[in-house]
Image (tube, rainbow, N blue to C red):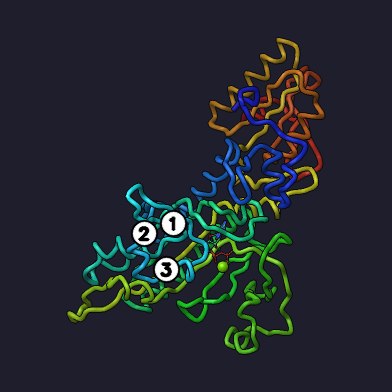
C-alpha cells in the first residue's frame, strides 16, 4: 500500500477525552476512529491487524474441531425469556430496540441462547454429538464504564465457540483441548509469556471458569500468579479453600493487574434444560446436552497487545499481527532515485510481501521516521540517495536500536 494513497494521517494528539494508552496510540497512528466513548471504527491499518488476529483464532479453533458459522445480531425476545435473560433487572447491559409494529428485539450481548435454539433443531441422538460451532461477531453491551479504549467497548468484535457434548466426560476432554488452543493463540499474537490461565468464578454455571489474564497496568482485574507453574487465581475467588483445592502455595503468589483476554466456561445443562436441548443416548434414554462456552474479545486482545508491547515512540507490533511486515520509507526526491525506490516496492509486492510504502513527497525524513515508529511495523527499510549510490538500503527492526546497511539484491532475496 502506498502511503500517498492512504487517507489516514498520523496525529500528534489523541482526542482529549481518551484516557487509555491503547486507544490513544491506535488513534494517533491511524488505526482507529473514535465514534463515542466505547465505540470505535476500524480504519485500514486497524482492520488489517484485526484480520490477522481473526485468522490466528480461526486456525486454532478449526484445529480442535470448531465449525464456523454466523448468528444474527438482532435477537428475538421470546428466546431470551426461556433462559430468563431478557429481563433488564437480570441482565443490565442490553441494548434493546423495537420493530415498527412495536415488537421488542435485542442486540446480542452474548450467544448462548441463539446457539441453544439453533442447535436444538439438529441434535437428536448421541450420534450427533459432540459438535463445536463458533462465530466471529459484533457484540453490544451497554457497559457503565468505558474508559479502557478497545479493551472495553460498548460495541466489540469477538469469537465465541459453544461445545455440545453428551456428558461431562466428553465435555472435559474438549475443555482441556481448548486450553491448549487458547495458549497457542496468545503465544502466536505475541503475549504468551504474560498471559496466565486463571481460576475465576464459574458464575451461576459451575464452581470455576478459566480466564486467560494478560498482565498489564491497564488491566481491570487483580490476579495472584504462581510464577513457577504460570497458573493464577482471580481475586474474586481468592480464598484459602480455593488455593488448597488449586494446589497453589499461597506464600509464593504474586499480585498483578491483568486484563481478561479470553475465558472458557463449563455451562453444563444451564441452557440445554430451558431450551429442552436433549438427545437419545446409546440405551434409548433421553438426556440433556452438556454445554461449554469459549470467548475471546478480538478488540480487547488487540488493545492488550498495544498496552503491553508499545514503547515511548509508539506501537511495536509482533510480526504475526502487524498490519504490514515491511515499512519501506523513501527519502528520494530526484526522479531517477524515485524510480529506483518504486522498483524496489514493486519487486517486494511481486514477492507477496506486505509492504507499506512511504512514497510521500514534501515530508521531512524526521517526520517519516516518527510516523514509522508510531505505526510500529516490524521492519523498516530506508531508501535514500546516500545509500542508493552503492545499490544499498538501510534496514532496522522496530524492536532493535541498531540499523544496518544491506545491498538491494540481498533485500530482495
Ligand atoms: P469482563 O469480565 O471483562 O467484563 P466478561 O467476563 O463479561 O468480561 P464474556 O462475556 O465472557 O466477558 O466475553 C468473552 C470475552 O469477550 C472476554 O473474555 C473478553 O475478552 C471480551 N469482552 C467482554 N466484554 C468486552 C467489552 N466490553 N469490550 C471488549 N471485549 C470484551
Ligand atoms: Mg469476566
Residue pointed to by mark 2: 133
Q: Which residue is drawn at 52% across and 44% down?
A: 51
Query: Where's residue 332, x and y in %?
Result: 75, 18
Query: Where's residue 93, x and y in %?
Result: 52, 62
Closer to the eye: label 2 or 1: 1
Quadrant in the picture for residue 85: bottom left
Q: Distance between the residues labelled 1 and 3?
A: 11 Å
Q: Which of 262 and 9 is in front in this view?
A: 9
Determine crowd level at label 2: few under 14, some 14-19, many 20+ residues with C-alpha closer than 10 A: some
In the rendered structure, find residue 108 and report the number of the disc placed on it: 1
Q: Nearer the viewer, residue 378 or 290?
A: 290
Drawn side of residue 309 relative to residue 125, left or right: right
Q: Which residue is drawn at 33% across and 65% down?
A: 116
Dot 3: what SS?
Answer: loop
Residue 29 seen in the current view: yes
Which quadrant: the C terminus? top right
Q: Earlier in the sequence, mark 2 or mark 1?
A: 1
Q: Earlier in the sequence, mark 3 or mark 2?
A: 3
Query: Where's residue 352, x and y in %?
Result: 53, 31
Quadrant in the picture for residue 133: bottom left
Residue 179 seen in the current view: no
Dot 1: what SS?
Answer: loop
Residue 256 lies, with reference to residue 342, above or below; the image says below
Q: How far apart are marks 3 and 2 (CA)?
A: 22 Å
Closer to the eye: label 1 or 3: 3
Q: Residue at x 77, y 22 (%)?
A: 363
Residue pointed to by mark 3: 85
Query: Where's residue 347, x and y in %?
Result: 58, 23
Drawn side of residue 113 relative to residue 34, left or right: left
Amino acid at each position: 500500500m502506498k502511503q500517498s494513497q492512504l487517507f489516514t494521517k498520523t496525529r500528534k494528539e489523541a482526542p482529549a477525552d481518551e484516557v487509555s494508552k491503547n486507544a490513544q496510540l491506535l488513534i494517533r497512528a491511524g488505526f482507529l476512529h473514535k465514534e463515542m466513548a466505547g465505540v470505535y471504527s476500524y480504519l485500514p491499518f486497524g482492520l488489517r491487524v484485526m484480520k490477522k488476529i481473526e485468522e490466528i483464532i480461526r486456525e486454532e479453533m478449526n484445529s480442535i474441531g470448531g465449525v464456523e458459522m454466523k448468528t444474527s445480531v438482532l435477537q428475538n425476545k421470546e428466546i431470551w425469556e426461556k433462559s430468563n435473560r431478557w429481563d433488564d433487572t437480570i441482565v443490565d447491559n442490553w441494548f434493546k430496540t423495537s420493530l415498527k409494529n412495536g415488537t421488542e428485539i435485542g442486540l446480542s450481548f452474548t450467544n448462548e441462547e441463539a446457539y441453544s435454539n439453533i442447535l436444538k433443531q439438529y441434535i437428536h441422538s448421541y450420534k450427533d454429538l459432540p459438535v463445536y460451532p463458533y462465530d466471529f461477531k459484533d457484540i453490544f453491551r451497554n457497559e457503565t464504564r468505558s474508559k479502557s479504549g478497545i479493551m472495553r467497548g460498548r460495541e466489540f468484535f469477538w469469537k465465541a465457540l459453544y461445545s455440545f457434548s453428551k456428558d461431562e466426560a466428553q465435555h472435559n476432554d474438549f475443555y482441556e483441548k481448548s486450553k491448549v488452543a487458547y495458549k497457542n493463540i496468545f503465544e502466536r499474537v505475541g503475549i504468551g509469556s504474560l498471559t496466565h490461565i486463571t481460576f475465576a468464578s464459574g458464575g451461576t454455571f459451575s464452581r470455576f471458569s478459566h480466564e486467560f489474564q494478560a498482565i498489564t497496568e491497564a488491566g481491570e482485574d487483580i490476579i495472584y500468579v504462581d510464577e513457577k507453574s504460570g497458573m493464577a487465581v482471580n481475586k474474586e475467588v481468592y480464598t484459602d479453600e480455593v488455593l488448597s483445592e488449586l494446589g497453589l502455595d499461597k506464600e509464593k503468589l504474586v499480585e498483578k493487574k491483568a486484563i481478561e483476554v479470553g475465558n472458557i466456561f463449563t455451562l453444563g445443562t444451564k441452557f440445554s434444560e430451558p431450551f429442552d436441548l436433549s438427545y437419545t443416548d446409546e440405551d434409548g434414554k433421553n438426556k440433556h446436552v452438556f454445554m461449554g462456552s469459549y470467548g475471546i474479545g478480538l478488540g480487547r486482545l488487540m488493545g492488550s497487545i498495544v498496552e503491553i508491547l508499545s514503547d515511548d515512540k509508539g506501537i511495536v507490533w509482533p510480526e504475526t499481527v502487524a498490519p504490514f511486515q515491511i515499512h519501506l520509507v523513501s527519502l528520494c526526491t530526484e526522479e531517477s532515485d524515485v524510480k529506483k525506490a518504486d522498483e524496489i516496492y514493486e519487486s517486494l509486492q511481486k514477492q507477496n510481501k506486505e509492504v507499506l510504502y512511504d512514497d510521500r513527497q514534501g515530508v521531512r525524513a524526521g517526520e517519516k521516521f516518527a510516523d514509522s515508529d508510531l505505526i510500529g511495523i516490524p521492519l523498516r527499510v530506508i531508501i535514500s540517495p546516500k545509500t542508493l549510490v552503492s545499490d544499498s538500503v538501510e534496514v532496522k527492526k522496530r524492536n532493535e536500536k541498531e540499523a544496518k546497511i544491506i545491498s538491494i539484491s540481498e533485500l530482495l532475496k
